[in-house]
């Protein structure tokens, strides 16, 4: 059995580091406070990518890989035992190929964003695919992107004798158990039983997974967490289990793993994951975090509502299953009892021969943005094109992610025709009473509720 570490140590550009900081300190704060100023702070919100570093982690196939992550959102506790590469660590006697490509194509002007682009390209270089998507989470104010895209196109694949490839092969990146007590406490249990026991011993502790929501608060020193219990190393929360009638997804699996491992199985999930934030966020964000945070504009709950997902929840008194439709109880309120953890999400496979299922997200930007309205729809048809099962689920139109249950009931037994859609649209427009905010007016949101369903009809039937 692996002993629980009590020191917060990690490897930074090959050097072993043992900071005495609070585990609430973000990795970026630590880098800047210790004079490692190559990594930049832009937004501190996970939006601009200036702070990107590479962390050695496991990819979806369980192999060690470099993953681009936003250092402004990662608490130091979460990097314990890990290996981190920053922009200061990638040039040897000569520039790293991604640095050379950026210089050759003129991919840098003021240079503020450049370390972040370099590190995203660096991680992609060892992943085997360098393309525009590799830098989707990096913003630049000066270059107009053309030269950066040229740099990405110019970079070829890593050679086996590359020192970073050798490093990847030699590092064990499995997170080990940790109880670090600095100014604040950070626990990283390595079994579900230990996580539940810790939560019982420390009812005031906060669960943390990828920290893409909680890290925002730490990044801006808005909130300090006296005790954090990390779910990153709990194996029961990191699996994907497939059976003939369902897929069960571990609550602490990074979304990028779900994206690649389940691609093609649930088209509505694929489409929403593609539009979810950017690469650096998806390398850390989890399904459990997206559900647990209970935001009315979380993008995955509408998809899970439309697919009739069930949550597996564990606590002191054992495990229970709960349909996700019964999970959200009010604005940021859930059915989780104190001491409970979301373990996994079960998505039933369709038994229908004729299932139509898609998802949509409308935001101010096409990608790397949060939703104004998100929607996911599932319709099952019989042999005569009559609707036998309907799920219409939305985000951004109420205090919680929500289904249009009255409309679903009205759709049953109706023909799947343009006439049905036109009859339903005015009713759908009046189903919810959304708010007006910076992202959109109430009337715009109402229109979207109806028009996205029509769009679904057109796309799914053409
Ligand atoms: C730049 C940026 C872009 C984003 N874009 C999107 C987007 O496009 N769409 C979207 O929906 N969201 C987006 N988010 C929000 C965030 O990434 C997601 O909500 C994400 O899924 C949270 O997962 P996490 O693992 O990082 O959660 P954490 O921050 O670790 O935790 C979030 C909350 O969930 C709780 N929690 C975590 N895991 C569990 C569990 N297993 N059981 C019980 N409670 C748990 C935690 O206690 C905490 O309250 C974005 C965030 C940022 C910073
Ligand atoms: S500083 Fe902007 S993403 Fe971290
Ligand atoms: S080169 Fe100036 S922000 Fe990108």
Image (cartoon, grey):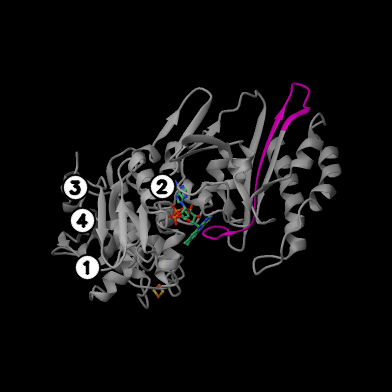
Task: Tell me how far mark 1 sits from mark 3, CA to CA.
Answer: 24 Å
Q: How far from the left and from the top, in percent, is residue 175?
A: 26, 48
What residue would you read off at disc 3?
171
Rendered image quadrant of residue 192: top left
Q: Is mark 2 within 8 Å of ligand 1?
A: yes
Task: Tell me how far mark 4 sits from mark 1, CA to CA.
Answer: 11 Å
Callout 4 touching callout 1 (CB < 8 Å)? no
The answer to whether any part of residue 138 appears in the image is no
Q: Is residue 382 magenta?
A: yes
What residue would you read off at disc 1?
20
Q: Earlier in the sequence, mark 1 or mark 3?
A: 1
Q: Earlier in the sequence, mark 4 or mark 1?
A: 4
Q: Earlier in the sequence, mark 1 or mark 2?
A: 1
Rendered image quadrant of residue 219: bottom left
Tell me the mark number nearer the camera, choosing from 4 and 2: 4
Q: How far from the left and from the top, in percent, is residue 426?
A: 84, 49
What residue would you read off at disc 2?
254
Q: Earlier in the sequence, mark 4 or mark 2?
A: 4
Task: Tell me how far mark 4 sits from mark 3, CA to CA.
Answer: 21 Å
Q: How packed is label 3: few (under 14 Cα within 10 Å), some, or many (20 or more)?
A: some
Q: How far from the left and from the top, in percent, is residue 394?
A: 67, 49
Residue nearest the observer in this picture, 369 or 222? 222
Tell me the mark number nearer the camera, choosing from 1 and 2: 1
Point out the stretch of residues depicted in magenta: 366-389
Tell me the mark number nearer the camera, choosing from 1 and 3: 1
Residue shown at the point (36%, 57%) measured from the top left? 228
Q: How packed is label 4: few (under 14 Cα within 10 Å), some, or many (20 or more)?
A: some
Indicate the quadrant containing the C terminus: top left, top right, bottom left or bottom right: top right
Q: Is residue 34 magenta?
A: no
Task: Tell me how far mark 4 sits from mark 2, CA to CA.
Answer: 25 Å
Q: Earlier in the sequence, mark 2 or mark 3?
A: 3
């Amino acid at each position: 059995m692996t002993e629980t570490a009590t020191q917060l140590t990690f490897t930074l550009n090959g050097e072993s580091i043992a900071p005495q900081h609070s585990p609430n300190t973000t990795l970026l704060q630590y880098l800047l406070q210790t004079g490692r100023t190559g990594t930049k702070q832009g937004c501190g919100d996970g939006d601009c990518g200036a702070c990107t570093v590479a962390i050695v982690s496991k990819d979806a196939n369980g192999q060690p890989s470099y993953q681009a992550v936003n250092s402004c959102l990662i608490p130091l506790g979460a990097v314990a035992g890990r290996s981190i590469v920053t922009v200061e660590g990638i040039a040897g006697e000569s520039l790293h190929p991604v640095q050379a490509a950026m210089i050759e194509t003129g991919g840098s002007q003021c240079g503020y964003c450049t370390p972040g682009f370099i590190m995203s390209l660096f991680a992609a270089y060892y992943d085997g695919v360098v393309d525009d998507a590799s830098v989707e989470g990096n913003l630049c104010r000066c270059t107009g992107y053309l030269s950066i895209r040229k740099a990405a196109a110019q970079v070829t694949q890593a050679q086996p004798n590359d020192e970073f490839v050798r490093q990847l092969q030699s590092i064990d990146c499995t997170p080990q158990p940790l109880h670090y007590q600095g100014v604040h406490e950070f626990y990283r249990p390595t079994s579900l039983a230990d996580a539940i026991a810790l939560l019982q011993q420390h009812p005031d502790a906060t669960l943390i997974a990828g920290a893409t929501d909680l890290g925002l608060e730490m990044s801006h020193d808005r909130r300090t967490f006296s005790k954090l219990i990390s779910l990153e190393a709990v194996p029961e929360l990191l699996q994907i289990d497939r059976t003939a009638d369902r897929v069960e997804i571990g609550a602490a699996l990074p979304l990028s793993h779900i994206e690649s491992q389940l691609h093609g199985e649930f088209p509505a999930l694929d489409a929403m994951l593609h539009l979810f934030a950017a690469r650096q966020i998806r390398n850390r964000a989890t399904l459990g975090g997206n559900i647990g945070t209970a935001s009315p504009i979380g993008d995955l709950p509408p998809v899970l509502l439309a697919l009739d997902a069930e949550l597996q929840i564990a606590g002191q008194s054992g495990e229970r299953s709960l349909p996700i439709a019964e999970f959200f109880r009010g604005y940021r309120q859930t059915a989780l009892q104190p001491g409970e953890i979301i373990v996994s999400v079960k998505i039933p496979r369709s038994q229908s021969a004729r299932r139509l299922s898609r998802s949509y997200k409308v935001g101010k930007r096409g990608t790397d943005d949060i939703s104004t309205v998100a929607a996911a729809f599932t319709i099952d048809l019989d042999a005569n094109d009559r609707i036998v099962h309907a799920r219409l689920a939305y985000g951004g139109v109420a205090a919680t992610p929500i289904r249009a249950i009255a409309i679903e009931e009205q759709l049953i037994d109706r023909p799947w025709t343009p006439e049905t859609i036109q009859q339903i649209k005015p009713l759908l427009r009046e189903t919810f009473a959304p708010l007006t905010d910076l992202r959109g007016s109430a009337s715009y949101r109402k229109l979207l509720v109806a028009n996205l369903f029509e769009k679904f009809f057109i796309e799914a039937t053409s």
